[in-house]
Image (spheres, rainbow, N blue to C red):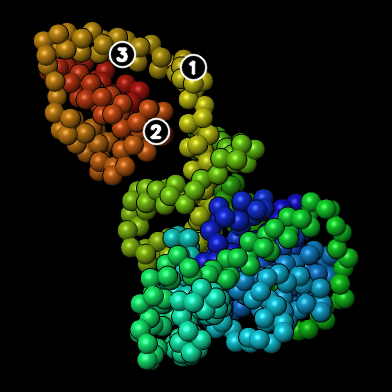
């Protein structure tokens, strides 16, 4: 049973995993808590959630989780707001933002709302939450880099801006102060307070202690089964039934092509084994690895515009979170393969023998070694750029990759230089043998792209 944490702009995934081994989901929205409760997680943590443009998580979903005996923690953003509203029913609130909502020091949703980027960029925050502006100005007063009057003026200016526009430059620009703010501006980059991030980390530590102690959470009072609640459950349950039926039908269609089924089954099994290995060894892909996977996939699939990607996700029954999970699986596979480099060559030779390609490739490799050796003695060489263009654009019919280092590592090579050396040798060999038809046919044995 997993632990679920809904998080987006407040913390990055790697920051969550520093405190807690959890399944990380995007900012919570309506229906999400009910969805995860069906899998009986050990605990649920809510940090971020949607406030506008997307229906917000219902209070009753959280009460439903509590009714099932699943502890629900909240802090920082949407989690703090819901925890303050549901504290008397058993939701556990953590942090200063929660305490301020609970006591009535703050009340507006916009105190924690921020503008953020899309999921594929890690929900990068693009504005400052009002709670962090308040905490930063309080700290600035303690450090005596801003006066009490100027702090109040800056607070008023920030509150007067829409939450999407709350960045420090605009806040300072909107503040009409009699004194200069140069000292405050110089202090700000190192002194500003991440109120939401601090609360989120505190909540994760609290969850970890709760789980380590093995505390049992008793079921709370029964949720009233209203018509709206029954309709929400029916809608979400219908999604699962529909997708499960589609999945079974799709796999049955795949089974009718035994060769394709076997090939994809092996890749799927490798993904599952890699996921388990990465979890045991703590080798989870970072954000840069996911962005490289996304860039490669979008290039291969021709999804160069954001609208093309969104349409592709819709056509393939994927959410952005599921897409990111798919990319993470591919990254884990690459990491697992890289860790097996020392043993992989022996296993590959065994597969070559089984496939019947071993003898032909061995003969080709020996012939190449002899010819290249003679060429080296005569100081022959190839233009490396020409070799790369020939290999990728002519042989593989694709553009030269932007990241040759990652491409090389994916092939089990030490790095970019090893890849370029390999391609240069192949280019020279092909140039030396292009006049003989039989030898030209040999060049393609076992090295065609695909599969």
Task: Name the foreground residue: 176 vs 313.
Answer: 176
Q: Residue at x 88, y 65 (%)?
A: 218
Between circles 2 and 3, the one closer to the viewer is 2
Disc 1 is placed on an element classified as helix
Among the two numbered marks 1 and 3 on one chain, the one whose residue lies closer to the N terminus: 1
Among the two numbered marks 2 and 3 on one chain, the one whose residue lies closer to the N terminus: 3
Among the two numbered marks 2 and 1 on one chain, the one whose residue lies closer to the N terminus: 1
Q: Is residue 28 at all visible to an observer of this figure? A: no
Contact flag, marks 2 and 3 (Cβ < 8 Å): no
Q: Quadrant of the C terminus?
A: top left
Q: Is residue 259 above or below residue 212?
A: above
Corner quadrant of residue 232: bottom right
Position of 295 with respect to 224 (left or right) is: left
Q: Disc 1 designates what residue? A: 346
Q: Residue at x 39, y 90 (%)?
A: 177
Q: Is residue 348 above or below residue 256?
A: above
Q: Disc 2 designates what residue? A: 409
Q: Is residue 311 at all visible to an observer of this figure? A: yes
Q: Residues within 10 Å of mark 3 (few under 14, many from 20)?
A: few
Distance from disc 2 to disc 3, alpha carbons, whole Å, reads 21 Å
Question: Whole-percent x and y of residue 173?
Answer: 35, 85
Task: Name the foreground residue: 187 vs 76.
Answer: 187
Q: Residue at x 50, y 56 (%)?
A: 323
| Residue 75 disc label | none
Between circles 1 and 3, the one closer to the viewer is 1
Q: Disc 3 designates what residue? A: 365
Task: Name the foreground residue: 147 vs 347.
Answer: 147
Corner quadrant of residue 310: bottom left
Disc 3 is placed on an element classified as helix
Position of 237 with respect to 356 (left or right) is: right
Corner quadrant of residue 424: top left
Task: Name the foreground residue: 432 vs 209.
Answer: 209
């Amino acid at each position: 049973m997993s632990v679920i944490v809904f998080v987006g702009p407040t913390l990055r995934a790697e920051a969550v995993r520093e405190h807690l081994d959890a399944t990380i989901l995007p900012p919570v929205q309506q229906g999400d808590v009910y969805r995860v409760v069906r899998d009986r997680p050990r605990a649920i943590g809510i940090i971020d959630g949607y406030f506008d443009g997307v229906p917000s998580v219902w209070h009753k979903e959280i009460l439903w989780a509590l009714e099932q005996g699943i502890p629900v923690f909240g802090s920082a953003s949407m989690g703090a707001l819901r925890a303050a509203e549901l504290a008397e029913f058993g939701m556990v609130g953590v942090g200063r933002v929660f305490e301020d909502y609970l006591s009535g020091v703050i009340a507006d949703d916009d105190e924690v709302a921020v503008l953020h980027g899309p999921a594929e960029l890690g929900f990068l925050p693009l504005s400052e939450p009002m709670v962090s502006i308040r905490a930063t100005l309080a700290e600035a007063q303690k450090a005596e880099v801003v006066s009490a009057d100027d702090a109040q003026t800056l607070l008023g200016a920030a509150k007067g801006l829409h939450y999407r526009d709350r960045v420090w430059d605009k806040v300072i620009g909107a503040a009409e102060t009699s004194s200069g703010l140069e000292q405050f501006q110089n202090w700000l980059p190192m002194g500003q307070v991440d109120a939401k991030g601090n609360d989120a980390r505190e909540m994760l530590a609290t969850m970890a202690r709760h789980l380590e102690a093995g505390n049992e959470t008793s079921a709370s009072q029964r949720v009233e089964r209203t018509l709206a609640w029954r309709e929400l459950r029916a809608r979400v349950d219908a999604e699962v039934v529909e997708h499960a039926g589609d999945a079974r039908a799709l796999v049955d269609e795949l089974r009718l092509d035994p060769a394709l089924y076997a090939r994809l089954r092996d890749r799927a099994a490798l993904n599952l084994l890699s996921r388990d290995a990465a979890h045991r060894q703590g080798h989870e892909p970072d954000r840069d690895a996911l962005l490289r996977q996304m860039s490669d996939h979008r290039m291969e699939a021709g999804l160069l515009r954001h609208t093309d990607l969104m349409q592709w996700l819709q056509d393939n029954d994927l959410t952005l979170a599921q897409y990111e999970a798919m990319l993470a699986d591919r990254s884990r596979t690459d990491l697992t393969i890289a860790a097996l480099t020392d043993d992989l060559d022996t296993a590959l030779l065994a597969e070559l023998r089984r496939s019947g390609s071993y003898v032909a490739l061995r003969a080709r490799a020996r012939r190449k070694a002899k010819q290249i050796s003679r060429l080296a003695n005569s100081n022959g060489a190839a233009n490396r750029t020409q070799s790369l263009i020939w290999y990728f654009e002519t042989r593989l019919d694709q553009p030269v990759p932007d990241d040759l280092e990652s491409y090389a590592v994916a092939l089990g090579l030490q790095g970019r230089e090893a890849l370029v050396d390999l391609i240069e040798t192949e280019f020279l060999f092909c140039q030396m043998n292009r006049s003989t038809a039989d030898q030209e046919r040999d060049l393609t044995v076992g090295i065609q792209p695909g599969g």
